[in-house]
Image (cartoon, helix red, strand yellow):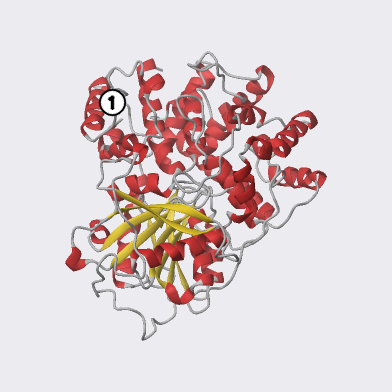
Amino acid sequence: MVHRRSIVAIAVAALFVASCANTSGVSTVAANEISAVEPDPSVVVPPGSGPGSIEWGPCAGAQASTVDLECGSITVPLDYAEPDGRLIDIAVARVATPYDDERIGSLVLNPGGPGASGIDFLQTAALVMPEEISRRFDLVSFDPRGVGASTAIDCDTVLDDNVTLLGAGDDAGWDALVVDAEAHPSTCTSDSVAIGALLGTNNAARDLDEIRAALGDDRLSYVGFSYGTRLGATYAELFPDRVRALVLDGAVKPTDDFTELDVEQGASIDRAFERFAEACDADEDCELSEIGPTLDVYSSLVASIAETGSIPTADPDRALTPGELQLGVIAAMYTTQLWPVLAQGMYAASAENDGTLLQVLVDTYLGRQPDGSYDNSQDAGFTINCADDLSRPPNDVVRVESEQIASSSQWFDDFLRASTGCIGAPLPVDPLIIGHADGAPPILVIGNTGDPATPYEWSVAMADFLTSAELFTVESDGHTAFLSIPCVNPVVVDYLVDLDLPEPGASCVNEAAADVFPPAGEGEFDKVVALFDCLRENGADGDLLADPTGQTLFEQVDPTDPSFAAAALACQELIGDL
């Protein structure tokens, strides 16, 4: 494999994992009639007309973007049971519609996680939002409590060490994971420990209602992806009469049995990987098939790295670990756009003893920065999940549950065996509220049949559970559908703009995924130069991309920089050509 092509793959991996990591997920049949008091969707609502308002201004630092982004914040109670107690900040951003005479209101987006920054996500989502929506709504998102620019969890965990431990399935490895989990609170600021139990989904839903009011909207229009569906469903349960429209894309099954969710997710990721292997083996343009059957190549890699302990990478100080090998493959299951990148990464690891590309997939998925630090998405996600989960079984029971989770997967059992549940997390004070959202208007649930992270059965369960939900099925691989699968966008447009749900049993097929492994073709170097020119023209940091040969790209690029991700989306056609 030509080294320059590996560098191009690294760039593409950085672009797409940065995007899908911010839209991804966890770690009721017939719609009701719209009531007579439902607001007419054509009624124009001037911005800022509600009881409160947000003071919008320029976005500071890394929040700067090529889209017309404005930032602000609201203050909310840390504990809604004590409204006169401590207040915390919730950071909010918007891309306002310039068409005031067509404006319906605000559309609030949540990318999932939990722990993902909505502000970062908005900068990419705004670029690909259907015009029928961006004309009619101010696009709004926020960093949930505990995340990013809001009052955030702040821990000094050396996540590289944690990733090294992943995949250690023996007793010593498990004991090391438990020691690390129990010590985790000591790596956090005292304030982070104090607020951790109050960062759950119920309070995030209450924050969402405060945002709705501050935006001046009588009712909420909302799109939630992955974990964002749990947040949306919780909002509908707490505030059913304040819902205008909810899109729940890639739903998390409404249950408080988190081990059950992990088991079902493990099996779903396995199925996605087997479909990747089948597609690669059947396509002569998938270079991994030159070595042998994909599943055999992967099994050999797992066995080899278990024996050697690591695979070298371009960074002499960091080798690819057994846990990273498995997580890199899992990360690529989130979108078929990463399947060619995964094939190249597995080829390099197997044929060239080079784990660089697989490690890039892991680093971007986990939010690793160029200086070796990590954003707080992993800590926030752990804290939010555990603030929802009331169960705190003893460690020996957690070990049994981790084995149960591992047994769900043939291909990633060692990685999944590293689950330590909520060991080290404080007990929640407000565990997740699960309800049917009686009284809410019609809700749209979307599920991909091949979703690895939130299995299709979860979307079916969510649609069945919510009193007024309708399910739209998408025959596709990949995690979530809206904004990434063309046949879904018109369905969401009709619902958000006109409040028209699809017919019961409606579905569509992702025709765009037919050719997953495009041929390398001729003139690849010229394509790379054209891509870099496009990225610079669309706001990516020129210093990061100064070398069009790509020889120093891996050392220079910060794929988590919002300007880089935004520029990448503007250059999707050129990226697809590679």
Q: Nearer the viewer, residue 384 or 302?
A: 384
Q: Locate residue 60, reporting x and y percent.
A: 34, 41
Label 1 amino acid?
Gly
For the C terminus, give its image quadrant.
Answer: top left
User: Do we see residue 418 in this rendering?
Assistant: no
Residue 68 shows in this picture: yes
* Pick the front one: 271 or 177: 177
Q: Residue furthest front?
A: 84
Residue at figure coordinates x 22%, y 31% from the top left = 534
Residue 272 percent coordinates (x, y):
53, 44
Please indicate whether residue 308 sits to the left or right of residue 33 in the image: right
Give the image quarter of residue 403. top right
**Is 53 left or right of 533, judged from the image as shown?**
right
**Viewport quadrant of the N terminus:** top left
Residue in the foreground of this view, choosing between 67 and 486: 67
> Is 392 above or below relative to 19?
below
